[in-house]
Image: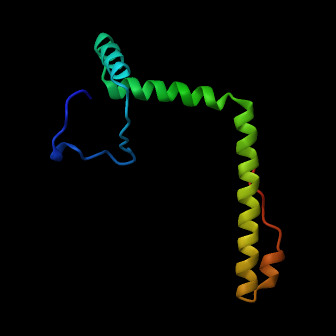
Amino acid sequence: MTTPTTGGERQNPAGVKTLAIRLEPDVHTQLTLIAQLRGSTITDEIRKALTAHIASVKENTDLASQAETAIAEIDREAAARREAIAHLFGNDQEATKPRASRGR
């Protein structure tokens, strides 16, 4: 995607997000050259790099541990909110009912 698009061409397919990134001129030049040599586009090269980065992050056990901690905190917050709503509307039995846990 090395050529600018006009207003009419900016319609994204469903589920695709558009991001703007700032690159130092030398990084942009190198990325442009890589894309040209590979017969690709800058966008495709960035997508490949991000896919590789995400795959690398998924293998990081420290991050996986942090994700599990975040999930546990989300579950605690959700339980507290359910209980508050149940108390607010006088449905205390719903607040004390055990919730089926999601399989992980």
Of all residues shown, which one is farthest toward the bottom? 90
Query: In the shown orientation, is residue 34 left or right of residue 96?
Result: left
How far across and down, in percent of the image, does residue 54 sit?
56, 31
Q: Residue furthest top?
A: 37
Q: Residue at x 74, y 33 (%)?
A: 62
Count the labels in the image. 0
42 or 87: which is nearer to us? 42
Q: Residue at (72%, 51%) from the top-left corner?
A: 71
* Relative vertical location of residue 33 with respect to residue 61 in this rendering, above or below: above
Q: Is residue 8 visible?
A: yes
Q: How is the image coloured?
A: rainbow
Q: Out of 20 and 58, give the one closest to the viewer.
A: 20
Q: Quadrant of residue 53?
A: top right
Identify the residue at image location x=73%, y=78%: 84
Measured as percent of width and height from the top left, residue 38 is found at: 33, 12
Rendering coords of residue 72 (x, y %): 76, 53
Q: Is residue 42 above or below residue 7?
A: above
Residue found 27% across the figure and 29% down from its top:
1
Q: In the shown orientation, is residue 64 left or right of residue 97?
A: left
Horizontal side, residue 36 vs residue 93: left or right: left
Classify residue 80 by image quadrant: bottom right
State the image quarter where residue 40 is shown. Answer: top left
Seen in the picture, residue 4 relative to 36 is either above or below; the reply is below
* Residue 104 visible to the viewer: no
- Picture layout, residue 21 above or below residue 83: above
Task: Say whether residue 8 is left or right of residue 45.
Answer: left
